[in-house]
Amino acid sequence: MKHEEANKEIAGRGAQRQRGKKVGGNSKIQNVQSPAPNPHPVVPNTQSPVPNLDNWLEIGKIVSPQGLSGELKVYPVSDFPERFEVPGKRWLLRLDGTEPQPIELLTGRCISNKNLYVIKLAGVETCDQAEALRGCKLMVPVSDRPQLAEDEYHVLDLIGVEVFMQASGELVGTVVDIIPAGNDLLEIKFHESFATGKKQKTVLIPFVEAIAPVVDLKSNRIEITPPPGLLEINN
C-alpha cells in the first residue's frame, strides 16, 4: 500500500505492498509545471513561529548535505518516488516558517539501502547553503492527493474511524495511527467500555481483508474479525 499521511505522506512509508486493503496517501506528482529556478538559496531565519499546516502534507525532511555541490539528503515520509525523482515544483517549510514556500526540484535519486533520497534544489549550490536547510521539510498541498483505486485508502481518512467487532457489533475503539510494516498495522485506541480489565490502552492489528473485511468510510466504520488472542496480545 502507498502512504501519505495527515501532515505527513506516510498513510506510511515504503513501497506498494501486497495486501487485502491498501492505504494511499497524498497525491503522486505527475509532470508538475514549475516556475523558473530561484537563483537565491532558501535560508532559514532565526525565529520560530508555529506553522499552519492544515492544508499541507509533509513528504520528507532534509537531514544533511550530500557532498560539496549543494545536494541534500532527504528522509522520505511518502511512498511515492515521484515526489523526489520527478523535477518540478515542491514547497519548503523553513525551520521558522508559518507557510511552505515554493522551490524547484531539479533532480533526485534514491539511496535504497539507506531509505534516503538525494535531491538538488534550485539556488542551493554549496555545502554551506545545503547545511542551512538541515531540518527543513518538503511539503505538498493536501489537494494534491491522488484518486485511489478500489480498496485503497488515504491514511488521513482512516485516522479517527471507529472499529467494531463484526460478529457482535461491539465498539472496540478508534484508529489513531497506521504503522508501516510488511502488512500495515492499524493502531486502535480501545474504547473505555472495551478496555475494561485490559492493561494496554491500544492494540495493533494487521490491516488485511481477512481481519478487516469491512471498511466503510462514509459511515466512519471498520469491522474486524480478529483471530482469538489478537486483541489480548499485550495483556
Image (cartoon, grey):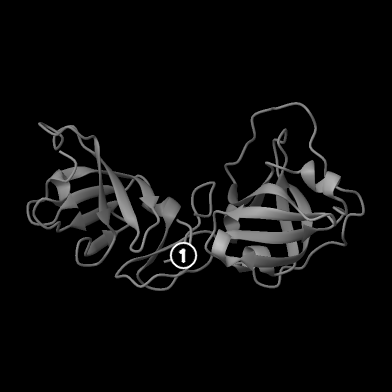
Amino acid at the residue labelled 1: Lys
Q: State the residue at coordinates (31%, 52%).
A: 186
**Residue 209 position within the rendered picture, expressed as x and y whole percent measured from the top left:** 24, 67
From the viewer's side, name the closer residue of 102 and 186: 186
Q: Residue at x 35, y 73 (%)?
A: 18
The correct choice, above or below, for 196 with respect to 65 in the image is: above
Estimate the x, y position of residue 196 in percent, counting from the top left.
Answer: 11, 32
Above or below for 19 versus 167: below
Name which quarter of the figure residue 197 lies in.
top left
Judged left or right of residue 58, residue 212 is left
Q: Nearer the viewer, residue 157 or 116?
A: 116
Q: Residue 193 at x, y = what percent?
A: 14, 34
Mark 1 nearby-residue class (10 Å; few <14, some 14–19, many ≥20): many
Q: How many badges with numbers are in the image?
A: 1
Front residue (pair 12, 29): 12
Q: Quadrant of the N terminus?
A: bottom left
Is residue 147 left or right of 166 when viewed as pictured?
A: right
Q: On the picture, is 66 further left or further right than 80?
A: right
Quarter of the picture containing the C terminus is top left
Pointer 1 residue: 2
Answer with the quarter of the image where residue 132 lies.
top right
SS for dot 1: loop
The residue lying furthest to the right in this view is: 39
Relative to 67, residue 147 above or below: below
Which residue is located at x 73 percent, y 40 percent?
94
Residue shown at the point (17%, 32%) measured from the top left = 199
